[in-house]
Amino acid sequence: MAKVLVPLADGCEELEAVTIIDLLRRAGIEVVTAGLKPGVVKASRGVQLVPDVTLDAALQDSYDMVVLPGGMPGASHLKDDARILALLKKMAAAGKYTAAICAAPMVLAEAGLLQGRQATSYPGFLDGVPGVTVSTSAVVLDGTVLTSRGPGTAMDFALALVEVLAGGDTRRQVETALVRP
């Protein structure tokens, strides 16, 4: 079974975080949520999220993928955290998947993971980043990097994550159970 880390920072976009966590777990994928600091994470719209562990504890384990929810200032907190940047670089060096939605692709860019790649984000967050071909697609997969636009694309993004980690059949099973149009 695949194992995914979802770091949670104060000011993250709750719709994105919860959608990612929920759909991955529906697919039977192990998800570990980790707060940048101990305690409850207050998301961008005031929803309180309780991480499974702290980031320091989570970093003692290994993962098949790291997924960064967006939202502001959550994505900025992720970008400013040296542990997150080091983890992303380590994942990329090992050929493992990294993913980000909304404003969080800027964290992947900060870690150098978008150089020479196509990526998408919430409008404006990747503008002017050298070496990145910015797309307006809902979800972009380039090698081992997945990116997505924002809250409105969160379900498409999470289903793409399921497909990458568990295959097309599992994605279809999860999507069918959601009764999507």
Image (cartoon, grey):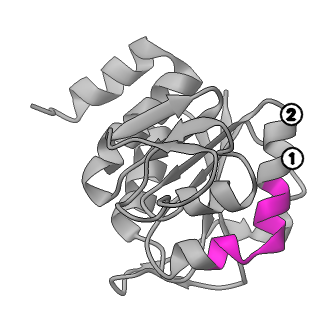
Contact between marks 2 and 1 (CB within 8 A): the answer is yes
Give the residue at mark 1.
90
Q: Position of residue 174 (x, y in %)?
A: 34, 28
Q: Which residue is mark 2?
A: 94
- Secondary structure at badge 1 equals helix
Q: Is residue 123 left or right of residue 30?
A: left
Q: Amino acid at mark 1?
A: Lys
Q: Measured from the top left, where is residue 172 in percent x and y? A: 32, 19
**67 to the left or right of 178:** right
Cα gap from disc 2 to disc 1, whole angstroms: 6 Å
Q: Which image quadrant for residue 15?
A: bottom left
Q: Tell me what residue is drawn at x 66 percent, y 37 percent.
A: 116
Q: Is residue 62 something one can see in this rendering?
A: no
- Given residues 36 and 149, the one toward you in this image is 149
Residue 45 magenta-highlighted = no
> Which residue type carries mark 2?
Ala
Quarter of the figure with the N terminus: top right
* Residue 101 higher or lower than 170, as above or below: below
Query: Which contiguous range is marked in magenta?
Result: 77-87
Q: Secondary structure at mark 2?
A: loop
Instruction: Tell me, yes or no, whether the highlighted magenta stretch contains residue 83.
Output: yes
Residue 159: x and y in percent read 39, 33
Task: Tell me the quarter of the picture where residue 41 sits.
Answer: bottom right
